[in-house]
Image (cartoon, grey):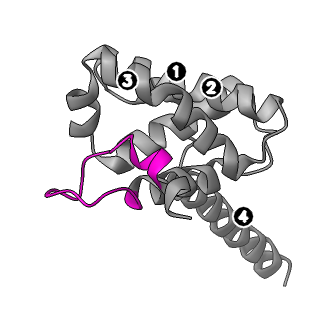
Amino acid sequence: MSQMRNLSKYFLSIFLGAILLFASVLSPSPAFADDFELSPAVSEVGETFSDKYCVAISDGSPADQAALVAGRQMISSLMRSGALKEVMAVPKEDMASFIAANIFETCGDNIGVSELELNTSILNLANQGPRQSQTKPFNPSSLINNSQNT
């Protein structure tokens, strides 16, 4: 009886260890802005947007409006910078993830939404912009066009 109890404890500990191992391997690791391989010009645009987003949050804008405020503030400089074509060539999903990760690195995680919610919100804003011939690229002007449509 004692051997049976020891054997069951042994298998239980192996089973729990395997579950913990699988959970740590299968759980998504947090994304950091440095994890993305974007051109310097595109990275600068994302970082500028993130900085302006953080300023809007610190000025009291709610999280859903901060993206619109940041988009309005940076769109004219983006048009003049010559990086617009580069930014629009980046897949929307990658750009949204980069911006969300950068915002969390810059502002911290106390902005009122999770990184996943922020990523989804930015991606939704990008998808609501004017329709393009190709659905994948990120369109920075969609961040401000959304507010004009409402």
Q: What residue lies at 82% left-to-right and 78% top-to-bottom?
A: 5
What residue range appears in magenta? 127-145
For the residue marked with disc 1, what is the amino acid? Thr
- Residue 36 percent location from the top left of the image: 38, 30
Q: Which mark is residue 48?
A: 1
- Does the rendering let one see residue 27? no
Are the residues flagged by discs 1 and 2 in contact, CB closer than 8 Å? yes
Seen from the viewer's position, the closer of residues 147 and 42 is 147
**Mark nearer the viewer, 3 or 4:** 3
Would you say residue 56 sits in the magenta stretch?
no
Find the distance from the CA under tag 2 to the CA under tag 3. Answer: 13 Å
| Farthest left residue in view | 133
Q: What residue lies at 48% left-to-right and 60% top-to-bottom?
A: 124
Q: Quadrant of residue 106?
A: top right
SS for dot 1: helix
For the residue marked with disc 3, what is the amino acid? Leu
Q: Which mark is residue 78?
A: 3
Characterize the magenta stretch by its predominant secondary structure.
loop
For label 4, the residue is 13
Q: Alpha-carbon neighbours of circle 3 within 10 Å: few (<14), some, or many (≥20)? A: some
Are the residues flagged by discs 1 and 3 in contact, CB closer than 8 Å? no
**Mark nearer the viewer, 4 or 2:** 2
- Residue 69 percent location from the top left of the image: 63, 38
Find the distance from the CA under tag 1 to the CA under tag 2. Answer: 6 Å
Q: Alpha-carbon neighbours of circle 1 within 10 Å: few (<14), some, or many (≥20)? A: many
SS for dot 3: helix
Find the distance from the CA under tag 4 to the CA under tag 2. Answer: 50 Å
Q: Alpha-carbon neighbours of circle 2 within 10 Å: few (<14), some, or many (≥20)? A: many
